Image (spheres, grey):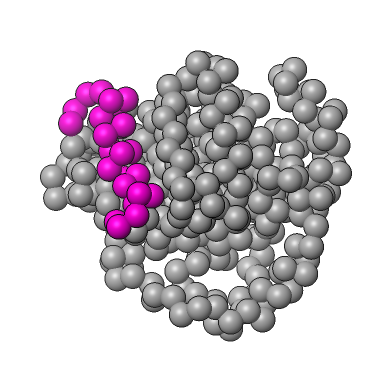
Amino acid sequence: MSSNMDRFARRIGRRSFLAGTAGLATLSLTAQAQDFPKLPPMPKAWIDAEQIALWPNGTPTGGFAAKPLPANWPDIMVRNIDRPLLRVFRPEKSNGRALLSIPGGAYTFVSILNEGVDVARAMTAQGYTVFVLTYRLPDEGWAGRADVPLQDAQRAVRVIRANAKRYGYDPDLVAAVGFSAGGHLGATLATDFAERVYPARDAIDALDARPAAMALIYPVIRFTAPITHGESALRLLGENPSAESIARRSPEFHVTAQTPPVFIVHALDDKAVPVENSLIMMRALQAAKRPLEIHLFEEGGHGFGVGPKDKPCGQWPALFAAWLDRHMTGKG
């Protein structure tokens, strides 16, 4: 643990974490009876997409326990994931690059439409082969809950690299984008890509898990009040995490000279995940002198995905594609 993490752990204890998660038991009970607004059905593009199992011989940790869903739980908010998968979306003409999309969902579900299928549509149009990850959720019984999503994210990058020849891109040119809690996972992947969170299973695990570039879209970064997203923190770390475990999964304390270039997007009117999360990550990257671009939009709220085309926040996919052109070299 670095000296920065030591100081952080001593300073916060558990009180700040618990302040940020207060009332979540009530929130969860309310959600069980919630009437969700009518949402789109599972998109055909998702159903038809080719699937790649991350762990064909079984996940590194066990303990999965499916949870009952409210009667009207939307299909596009995926839960009870015991078999993490990549879904593959191929461009008409490849630019020789690949992109891993990590949807959000407060570590409570995986939002596969606005942060999965829509992202694939936008980025395959730019020539990217897009892989959308449905990762295991830490609060569904898994042993070692705080490492489970990172196990899947590391493995996803390695599997994408292992399939480069099959799908026609350069294995060195694999970028990633994460949204909300998936942004926390993306930031953790960008900073802790080399952390040994599971024993090697096969030759794929000898490949590098470091993305060539990382985008963080309205990411959760900090797990302490007043800026944390309480549901994400609770689901990843549990009810009474130690200060050390909070610091271990706080990516701003893990930025190094090896952290890949990072592209950040956030709306200033985000009431769910305060913009300070992105600013904290920005400052950590600046301190480490890492390549960084950040876009703060006046409006957009939270969870806007690729964004409406008639608002400035809907321009970020084009800005991201232009940024990737500057930071990813090789084919394309």
With 248 as the anchor, is 330 left or right in this view?
A: left
Q: Position of residue 120 (x, y in %)?
A: 30, 53
Camera-side residue: 54 or 298?
Answer: 298
Q: Quadrant of residue 172?
A: top left
Label total for image: 0
Q: Which residue appears at 61% of the width and 76% of the height?
A: 69
Against 280, is 3 above or below?
above
**Residue 6 lies within the magenta run:** no
Q: Nearer the viewer, residue 173 or 327?
A: 327
| Outermost residue to the front | 298
- State the extent of the magenta-drawn residues as a range: 309-332
Q: Is residue 184 left or right of residue 238?
A: left
Residue 288 place in picture, x, y as percent: 55, 17
Residue 314 within the segment the image draws in magenta: yes
Q: Quadrant of residue 320?
A: top left
Residue at screen point 80% across, 30% down? 9
The relative height of residue 74 versus residue 21 in the rendered view (above or below) is below
- Place of residue 230 in the rendered image (x, y in percent of width and height, measured from the top left): 70, 53
User: Residue drawn 41% across and 30% down?
Assistant: 293
Q: Main secondary structure of the magenta part?
A: helix
Q: Position of residue 203 (x, y in %)?
A: 42, 33
In the depicted structure, whether residue 194 falls above or below residue 287: below
Report whether residue 155 is seen: no
Q: Is residue 146 visible?
A: yes
**Seen in the image, is 55 located left or right of residue 35?**
left
Q: Residue at x 66, y 35 (%)?
A: 250
* Location of residue 184 (image quadrant): top right
Question: Looking at the rendering, in which quadrant would you find the C terminus?
Answer: top left
